[in-house]
């Protein structure tokens, strides 16, 4: 409403200015011609001719302005309809600007077709991931089950037991890798629905620590939590727990026996920050920018089992919720991963 009023006032000012300018020009011309000896009849005809020409010019300008205004209104209607998801309406009117109008309509139609194709591809990927998950679940479950049965069989040699133990370990690793890749693909294609709500952060952390506690206890690693129960953040508890688990698992894996891991939580106006610090082997400064890459593994952890997908998956989960992760570290002095979850 304000913009239209300003535009209307601007038009009035232009019209008044134009009329005053024309009157001044006519008055000046009439005076000059009269001083040069022209009679009043000739001056009247000349003035009338000039007024007619100027009037015709003004009418033509107003016609062009109205045509341009109508065209801009049509384009505005088309763009607004496209924003709201409506089908573009073709305007079959041959004007000087209709070509650009039709090209805009074609662009909107192509954009909508592209959106439909993307949605179709997502559905295909979703179906493919479901098939992969279903087809690999049964064979892997059977391998793990038969390995356990073989391990419990009497009369096995020590070498046989070691071989069965390795089969079980590799089967678990393969199962974890397949499930991680499926989760990652579902995140990247948007086939996962995140239930983002205001949830207490301490519940998410406790749920995560309970999954890693036994592994930490076997290495005599102390895990402590500092978190006010009143602190909340907007996040999906299940998937955020998955991301924190990947960070904690790395902390346990790369921390020597007898080490410590501390989880602390702070809250400010925009984000809730979860710090996970450990006394592990640390990360070289030149590798800090690469640790979140898919399948990346640091030079000093080549001997430790892993595939380099945990940190990448954690970052994707947190980013998809509007947050981010930072890391600071130094070799042989531990690492600090900071997870920022939005509060608004």
Image (cartoon, rainbow, N blue to C red):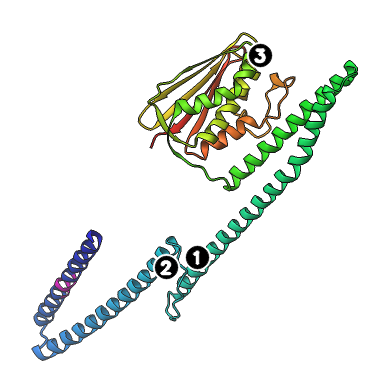
Instruction: Please report the residue visible at 55 percent of the width from the left and 22 percent of the height from the top.
Output: 209
- Residue 305 shown in magenta: no
- Labelled pair 1, 2 in contact (Cβ < 8 Å): yes
The numbered dot on residue 78 is: 2
Location of residue 148 in the rendering, given as x and y in whole percent from the top left corner: 80, 27
User: What secondary structure is found at the residue carrying circle 1?
Assistant: helix
- Labelled pair 2, 3 in contact (Cβ < 8 Å): no
Where, by quadrant of the figure, is residue 328 drawn?
Answer: top right
Is residue 147 shown left or right of residue 134?
right
Instruction: Please report the residue visible at 19 percent of the width from the left and 65 percent of the height from the top.
Output: 9
User: What secondary structure is found at the residue carrying circle 2?
Assistant: helix
Magenta stretch secondary structure, dominant:
helix
Location of residue 326 in the rendering, given as x and y in whole percent from the top left corner: 52, 27
Q: Which residue is denoted by mark 3 in the rendering?
A: 218
User: What secondary structure is found at the residue carrying circle 3?
Assistant: helix
338 or 28, nearer to the observer? 338
Q: Which residue is denoted by mark 1 in the rendering?
A: 108
Instruction: Judge whether residue 101 can be spotted in this image.
Output: yes
Location of residue 15 in the rendering, given as x and y in whole percent from the top left corner: 19, 71
Report the span colored magenta: 18-22
Q: Residues within 10 Å of mark 3 (few under 14, many from 20)?
A: few
- Residue 19 shown in magenta: yes
Instruction: Please report the residue visible at 75 percent of the width from the left and 33 percent of the height from the top.
Output: 174
Q: Say above or below: 190 vs 81.
A: above
- Labelled pair 3, 1 in contact (Cβ < 8 Å): no
Is residue 171 shown left or right of residue 37?
right
Where, by quadrant of the figure, is residue 183 drawn?
Answer: top right
């Amino acid at each position: 409403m304000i913009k239209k009023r300003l535009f209307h006032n601007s038009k009035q000012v232009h019209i008044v200015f134009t009329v005053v300018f024309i009157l001044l020009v006519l008055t000046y011309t009439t005076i000059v011609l009269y001083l040069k000896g022209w009679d009043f009849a000739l001056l009247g005809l000349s003035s009338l001719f000039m007024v007619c020409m100027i009037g015709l010019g003004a009418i033509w300008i107003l016609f062009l302005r109205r045509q341009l205004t109508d065209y801009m209104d049509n384009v505005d209607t088309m763009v607004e309809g496209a924003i709201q998801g409506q089908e573009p309406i073709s305007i079959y009117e041959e004007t000087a600007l209709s070509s650009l109008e039709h090209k805009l309509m074609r662009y909107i139609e192509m954009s909508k077709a592209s959106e439909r194709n993307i949605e179709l591809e997502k559905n295909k990927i979703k179906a493919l991931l479901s098939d992969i998950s279903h087809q690999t679940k049964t064979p892997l479950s059977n391998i793990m089950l038969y390995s356990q049965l073989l391990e419990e069989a009497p009369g096995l040699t020590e070498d046989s037991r070691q071989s069965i133990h390795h089969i079980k370990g590799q089967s678990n690793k393969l199962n974890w890798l397949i499930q991680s890749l499926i989760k990652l693909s579902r995140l990247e294609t948007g086939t996962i629905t995140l239930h983002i709500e205001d949830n207490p952060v301490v519940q998410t952390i406790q749920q995560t620590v309970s999954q890693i506690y036994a592994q930490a206890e076997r290495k005599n690693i102390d895990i402590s939590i500092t978190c006010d129960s009143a602190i909340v953040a907007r996040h999906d508890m299940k998937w955020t727990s998955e991301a924190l688990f990947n960070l904690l698992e790395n902390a346990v894996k790369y921390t020597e026996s007898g080490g410590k891991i501390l989880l602390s939580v702070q809250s400010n106006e925009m984000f809730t920050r979860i710090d996970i610090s450990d006394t592990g082997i640390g990360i070289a400064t030149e590798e800090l920018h690469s640790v979140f890459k898919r399948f990346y593994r640091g030079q000093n952890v080549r001997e430790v089992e892993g595939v380099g997908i945990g940190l990448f998956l954690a970052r994707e989960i947190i980013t998809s919720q509007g947050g981010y992760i930072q890391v600071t570290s130094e070799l042989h002095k531990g690492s600090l991963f900071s997870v920022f979850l939005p509060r608004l």
